[in-house]
Image: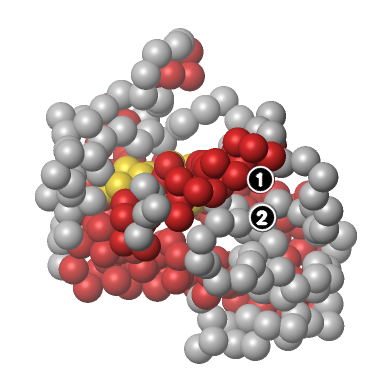
Amino acid sequence: MINDSNASASADIALRYRRRDALKLGGLTISATAFLAACGSGRGGDDAPGRVGFAPPIEELEDFPIDDAVLLRTASSLELTAIAVYEAVLDTGLLDGDLTDLVERMIENHQMVADEMSELTESLGGVAWECTNPWYMERTVAPLLAAVLDSDDPLRDIINTAVVLENIAAATHQTLAIELTDAEAAKATLAAAKLESRHSAHIVAVARGADGYVNPLIDGDGDAPLDADGVPYKFSITNRFGATGQVELVAGKPNENGVRQTFIIQTPSLNSWIYNELEPTC
């Protein structure tokens, strides 16, 4: 622990630095501040964790209720988000005939599921959501598409992005089927999960053929198989059971250190639910 005399000495030393010199201390200054705060004695006041430096205040999440309508509105939003991504992909002109046909078919399927989720929302007394998911569009889709379009191999990244989107969509519907209290809604989300799992498998099959059918890690230990550029391969069958956790996606060109961006794509949570109180953004 630091006694009063040591604290006084530290204060005297700090006074000998001008402001611009003190800034040079960077992380050392922050660490020292945290250490002094932790070791001080006889201090009162708020015992909540504090922050050092300048930052905007933390905004608390709204405590809105989550009911079946919220879950279904969120499902609709993710289907429409996938459509927005695929339409952007088609606009690149990078896909060949088979992949173009597949993406167009997936757009139709996602719209079908979105419409079904909207109908179910209204049947339960909610207001259908007909926009993309603003949280995913701003924090995931926008930076991801920017990385993909600036990639040294955009076609590879487009394919991998599509696989991840379908896997996350399937995981989301699988999770919603458990959370929903309405039997018809739960049945519909299970059907959507199955459909989008097939999407994911079909993308890899078309893009990589038999080499992409089964992930070899299913039956053994080791590292994920990588392509010549060090990007993990995607597989039609990734594990023995349907996964509902987050998915990692490596995309974009390498930076000056040879490192590519890694995007963590997750199923919806408190900050990405389409609450009943949320107004449309489209």
**Quick check: can you spot residue 67?**
yes
Residue flagged by tag 2: what amino acid is it? Gly
The location of residue 88, given as percent across then percent down, is: 29, 71
Asked if residue 29 is positioned above or below residue 147 in the image, the reply reads: above
- Crowd around label 1: few <14 · some 14–19 · many ≥20 (10 Å): few
In terms of depth relative to the viewer, which is nearer, 148 or 22?
22
Q: Which residue is mark 1?
A: 37
The location of residue 31, given as percent across then percent down, is: 51, 42
Q: Which residue is mark 2?
A: 50
Q: CA distance from mark 2 to mark 1?
A: 10 Å
The location of residue 65, given as percent across then percent down, is: 83, 71
Residue flagged by tag 1: what amino acid is it? Ala
In terms of depth relative to the viewer, which is nearer, 86 or 183?
86
The location of residue 197, given as percent across then percent down, is: 51, 46
Q: How is the image coloured?
A: secondary structure
Residue 185 left/right relative to 104: right
